[in-house]
Image (cartoon, rainbow, N blue to C red):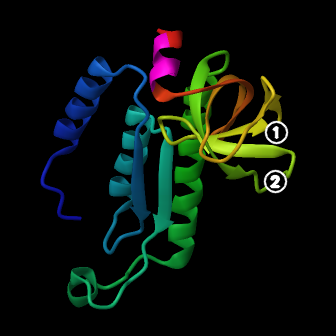
Amino acid sequence: MRRGYSREAYLDLIERVRNLLPNVALSSDFILGFCGETEEEFTETLSLIEAVQYNVAYIFPYSMREKTTAHRRFKDDIPEDVKAERMRRTIEVFRRNATELNSRMIGQEQLILIEGNSKRSQEDFYGRNDGNIKVIIPKVTLNSREIQPGDYIAVKIHSASSQVLKGTPLRHTTLADFHEFVH
């Protein structure tokens, strides 16, 4: 898809970033079943996901869009059932790796920006950490102060899946105070 770099250069960049920022969270988009994609090319995508171990991934089957270069130049020749199978396999690899990565955060104190009510329970809020990973916390009062969307909350992580962390709110904080307190 007209990338101006090689796989090796990309992996080298990832290694340099991780050496500088060991806890960096990485995300990427993956479009599966692009015109002419071979099984070998798809397998290379899976091995890249294994090698990099992304915290967040947006995974989609390719679909032809009018007024794009691909629409003018290529034929959408990958059958929908092949795209669906590649999606299933990619999601499986991503979830396994992301669950392992996110599980390493259990026991850590993380800074969470509260975004709003959880979609699954009105008893919970959701927010995101600095890696853009969703974190669910119960609605509680901390030091006589209710938690509100827009608040920064220090949270101790107690469980993890490939998509979500869950934690216990500890205190209201700010960016500066959190980093001073934790470090």
Q: Position of residue 156 (x, y in %)?
A: 68, 21
Taking the spot 50% from the left edge, 38% from the top edge, the residue there is 55
Q: Residue at x 74, y 45 (%)?
A: 125
Q: Earlier in the sequence, mark 1 or mark 2?
A: 2
Q: Tell me: 147 left or right of 98.
A: right
Q: Position of residue 158 (x, y in %)?
A: 74, 23
Q: Quick check: is 24 in the magenta stretch?
A: no
- How far is mark 1 from mark 2, CA to CA? 13 Å
Relative depth, front residue between 102 and 176: 176
For the point 53% across and 11% down, the residue is: 181
Above or below, 51 relative to 150: above
In which quarter of the view is residue 77 placed? bottom left
> Camera-side residue: 145 or 12?
145
Q: Which residue is mark 2?
A: 120
Residue 147 seen in this snapshot: yes
Q: Which mark, by number, is residue 88?
A: none
Residue assigned mark 1: 139
Task: Say which element carries label 1.
Answer: loop
Q: Position of residue 120 (x, y in %)?
A: 81, 53
In the image, the segment drawn in magenta is 176-180
Q: For residue 135, what is the image quadrant?
A: top right
